Amino acid sequence: VEATFIKHFANGNRRKGMKILRPHIKRERHRLTFSTGFSAGCVFSLIVALVSIIRARKIFQKEGHKDYMISMFPLYSLFGFIVLHMIMYAINIYYWKRYRVNYAFIFGFKQGTELGYKQVLFVSFSIGAFALLCILGNLDMQADPKTKSYQAVTELLPLFLLIAMFVVLMLPFNILYRSSRFFFLTCLFHCLAAPLYKVTLP
């Protein structure tokens, strides 16, 4: 396969062809490791806090609160699915790197701009932390008699978080992994526009 690729796509230049095929080793930064660990710690702490608040306030035993929990918690399941899929993607990247699979070339990423597994974990844990903060805020505002009258604002917290995620996804500035965000948006557009493409069979 390497010989065929070098012959047809690198004009027989083996050095040039192998430079494209072999993955480039990116230098890991301690700041990224710390940020990933910090966000993961926040997620686990918030999960413990959520379980403790539900048990301490006996939310499921109070009249009306059980129906509220049943109706509100599924709204946050979207963020749970996003975090779960990103963690699975990070695990895939880890094993691809371990076995030297050039996933950046396979998926068509620009060399040097692809995300590593720590970066994907950092993004997923950050989304999870913000989603859990919204859940805790939602429960606190619902349980507190002073803020219970703001029920409309309370129920819009998941929507605000979703809008914030879309705003970050669409940011044109070169921050927060712009090349990966734009690659995701391009793939999303191709998936949505797939029924409109004309297919011609040979």
Image (spheres, rainbow, N blue to C red):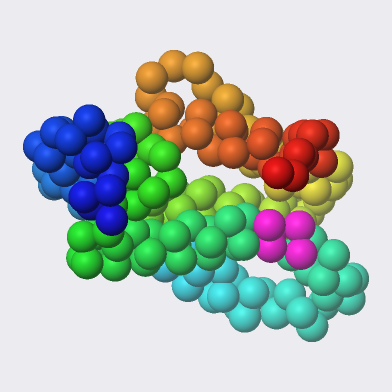
Q: Is residue 73 visible from the viewing direction of this image? A: yes
Instruction: Report x, y in % for residue 131.
Output: 58, 53
Q: In the image, which residues are magenta? A: 74-78
Point out the image quarter for the C terminus.
top right
Image quadrant in which you'd find residue 26: top left
Q: Residue at x 68, y 57 (%)?
A: 78
**Quarter location, residue 67:** bottom right
Residue 61 drawn at (x, y percent): 79, 83
Tell me if residue 119 can be seen.
no
**Residue closer to the observer: 169 or 201:** 201
The residue sitting at the top extreme is 173
Residue at the image point whose x is 46% and y is 66% from the top: 88
Q: Image quarter for residue 190?
A: top right
Tell me: residue 92, above or below residue 61.
above
Picture coordinates of residue 155, whole percent (x, y):
80, 48
User: 23 or 181: which is nearer to us?
Assistant: 23
- Give the prevailing secondary structure in the magenta stretch: helix
Q: Is residue 155 left or right of residue 116?
A: right
Q: Number of callouts in the render?
A: 0
Q: Which residue: 10% across, 37% down?
A: 15
In reply to whether residue 26 is colored magenta, the answer given is: no
Q: Residue at x 58, y 56 (%)?
A: 82
User: Where is the N terminus found, in terms of image quarters?
Assistant: bottom left
Q: Is residue 105 above or below residue 70?
A: above
